[in-house]
Image: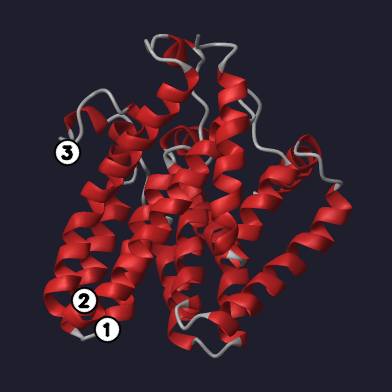
């Protein structure tokens, strides 16, 4: 097991180098950015703790995909596999819990550790995905595949909404809404083969606008149960709820446009910095989204007419 973690550390160093970062510098700068970003969040919004829990949940869930876990099961016994999954989840959860403890968000810090432990026994399996009915057609493959892979997290978001209403906690409902939007955004992290772009009978602008409409409609469909429930129980908070919904959809658009802005290359450091800046200063979205859109149009012209 020790060798496994040493290997993971080496792979992390290699990934950082491929991303354009010197590992030593990254190990110094990234924690500072995490601490600084958290400080900005807690100074600007009362929902900072919920946002950090949301991010931690997504980061931890990345370790739960079926291919990775199937491989681990072939090289470790069942007992060691369970311990390994628990340990690596807690390692990822620890920075988030510590920052929450620092800002005295004790229950949120505990929630991160509990969720990390629970997720360690969950595998996002693709083998059973064909039996799960989705509210989407076969065409928006990002949502069809993504919905099946993240089904348990979506159910968790709906459950948290119910609990938030039950204990009269509007903030928990907002957290659940943003969790759904973040999950939807994650569906666009993977680059598809250029064949699946080429088959569209659209020019590059038409393709992007079509993708945009599908993404917003599909994401709004998943948000609808939460959004409707919160409006019914908290009608006075309609303006705040609309603001969060619109902001979340803007971030979805940002991720979608960012996906194709460097296509077929993966995101690099400058792009990550631009996206990170919007988290601190959301008004930058009105400048960065059009910039990513124009870059995407240029990139896709090599594939689409």
Alpha carbon distance from label 1 to label 2: 8 Å
Alpha carbon distance from label 2 to label 3: 24 Å
Figure quadrant of residue 210: top left
Query: Considering only order in the chain, which callout, 2 or 1, is on the residue closer to the N terminus?
Result: 2
Residue denoted by label 1 = 169
Query: Considering only order in the chain, which callout, 3 or 2, is on the residue closer to the N terminus?
Result: 3
Q: Residue 261 carries which label?
A: none
Above or below for 200 versus 281 = above
The residue sitting at 19% across, 56% down in the picture is 224
User: In the rendering, at what x and y percent does residue 66 appear?
Assistant: 41, 36
Q: Which mark is residue 135?
A: 3
The residue sitting at 84% across, 49% down in the picture is 23
SS for callout 1: loop
User: In the rendering, at what x and y percent does residue 297 appear?
Assistant: 56, 25
**Front-most of residues 7 and 208:** 208
- Mark 1 surroundings within 10 Å by alpha-carbon count, few (fewer than 14), some (14 through 19), many (20 or more): some
Position of residue 107 in the picture relative to residue 87 (left or right): left
SS for callout 3: loop
């Amino acid at each position: 097991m020790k060798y496994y973690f040493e290997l993971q550390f080496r792979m992390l160093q290699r990934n950082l180098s491929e991303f354009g970062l010197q590992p030593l510098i990254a190990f110094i700068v990234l924690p500072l950015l995490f601490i600084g970003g958290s400080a900005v969040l807690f100074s600007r919004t009362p929902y900072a703790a919920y946002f950090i829990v949301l991010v931690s949940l997504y980061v931890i869930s990345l370790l739960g995909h079926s291919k990775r876990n199937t491989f681990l099961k072939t090289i470790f016994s069942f007992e060691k596999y369970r311990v390994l999954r628990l340990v690596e989840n807690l390692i990822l959860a620890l920075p988030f819990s510590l920052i929450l403890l620092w800002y005295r968000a004790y229950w949120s810090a505990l929630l991160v550790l509990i969720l990390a432990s629970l997720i360690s026994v969950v595998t996002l399996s693709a083998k059973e995905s064909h039996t799960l009915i989705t509210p989407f057609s076969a065409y928006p493959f990002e949502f069809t595949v993504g919905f099946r892979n993240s089904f348990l997290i979506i159910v968790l978001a709906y459950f948290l909404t119910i609990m938030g209403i039950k204990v009269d906690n509007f903030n928990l409902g907002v957290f659940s809404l943003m969790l759904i939007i973040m999950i939807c955004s994650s569906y666009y992290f993977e680059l598809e083969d250029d064949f699946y772009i080429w088959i569209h009978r659209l020019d590059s602008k038409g393709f992007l606008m079509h993708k945009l409409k599908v993404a917003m409609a599909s994401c709004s469909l998943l948000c609808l149960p939460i959004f409707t429930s919160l409006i019914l129980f908290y009608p006075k908070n309609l303006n705040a709820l609309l603001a969060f919904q619109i902001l979340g959809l803007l971030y979805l658009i940002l991720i979608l446009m960012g996906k194709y802005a460097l296509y077929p290359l993966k995101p690099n450091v400058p792009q990550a910095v631009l996206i990170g800046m919007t988290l601190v200063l959301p008004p930058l979205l009105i400048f960065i989204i059009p910039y990513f859109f124009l870059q995407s149009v240029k990139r896709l012209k090599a594939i689409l007419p």
